Amino acid sequence: MNRLDGRVALISGAARGIGGETARLMVEAGATVAIGDLLDERGRETARALGDAALYVHLDVTSAEDWTAAVAAALARFGKLDILVNNAGLFLGKDIEAASLAEWERLCAVNLTGVFLGTKLCLPALREAAQQSPHGSAIVNLASTAGLVGSTQDPLYSMTKGGVTLFTKSAALEFARKGYRIRVNSMHPGMTGTDMGDQVLVTRARNLGTNDIEAARRQVIERLPIGRMGTPNDIAKGIVFLASDDAAFMTGAGLVIDGGTTAQ
């Protein structure tokens, strides 16, 4: 199940957190991976830990040049590209009145432009690989539960992730119409124990008028039907599923892994 034998993946924001765990699980499932990130030292460490099955590439997702170079490096090392995971993302943690235009533009650059550029510039390689695969190639875009329902902590983040959600559906339909054999699906994590998750807790504590991060964490957990926050492994398993042939009949869909948050 969820095997990726012989597949090649490029994952943005993969030096740590969900991206790093996704890289690890993909290698375990038989894939080779190109790990893209701005955190060069951490990214190289992650790649080294995975051995010859991994390559680190410096990747600023807002840069077309970096994306082009990352794809070229993956092709030079592994010969093809079957899977793109648009994982890199930014959380602002400011409300509408507090956010500056520059902060909004940076949020859009990473969360929206990064997904557009990754999709556009990986497309030729993904399309070519799809012709040699029984079920084609796959793109997984990291959205959020905040891309499905309103966010009390960061409405601007919610706005960008809502864009990722609908871009995923539209890209899936476009590629199907053109016969590219590239499936496009989105992943919607709930509260997860990552660096970004910690930022959310800081924002939640601030909005409660306190600096007590643990109190904010307890409040989050109390509201989660499943009784705990998610882990990077919880989310990475879902990404591997969407990238695998087990999800061969899924495109334009969103997989929610949120401990029951959006069921309420």
Image: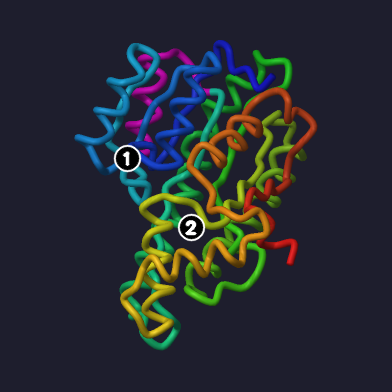
Residue 77 position, x and y percent, is 36, 14
Q: Mark 1 — residue?
A: 37
Residue 110's place in the image compared with 122, above or below, is below
**Nearest to the observer: residue 209 or residue 241:** 209
Q: Is residue 107 left or right of residue 186?
A: left
Image quadrant in which you'd find residue 214: bottom left
In front: 177, or 115? 115
Q: Residue at x 37, y 47 (%)?
A: 61
Secondary structure category for the residue under label 1: strand
Magenta residues: mostly which secondary structure?
helix
Could you tell which of marks 2 and 1 lies nearer the N-terminus? 1
Which mark's residue is nearer the viewer, 2 or 1?
1
**Label 2 environment density (alpha carbons within 10 Å; few <14, some 14–19, many ≥20):** many
Magenta range is 66-81
> Residue at 50% across / 44% down in the picture?
231
**Mark 2 → mark 1, Cα distance in angstroms:** 16 Å
- Identified at 27% across, 36% down, the residue is 58
Residue where numbered disc 2 is placed: 112
| SS of the residue under disc 2 | helix
Q: Amino acid at mark 1?
A: Asp
* Amino acid tagged 2: Leu
Q: Indicate whether residue 78 is drawn in magenta.
A: yes
Residue 163, compared with residue 232, is above or below; it is below
- Residue 186 falls within the magenta-colored stretch: no
Seen in the picture, residue 243 relative to 50 is either above or below; the reply is below
For the N terminus, the quadrant is top right
- Residue lying at the far bottom in this picture: please name it: 97
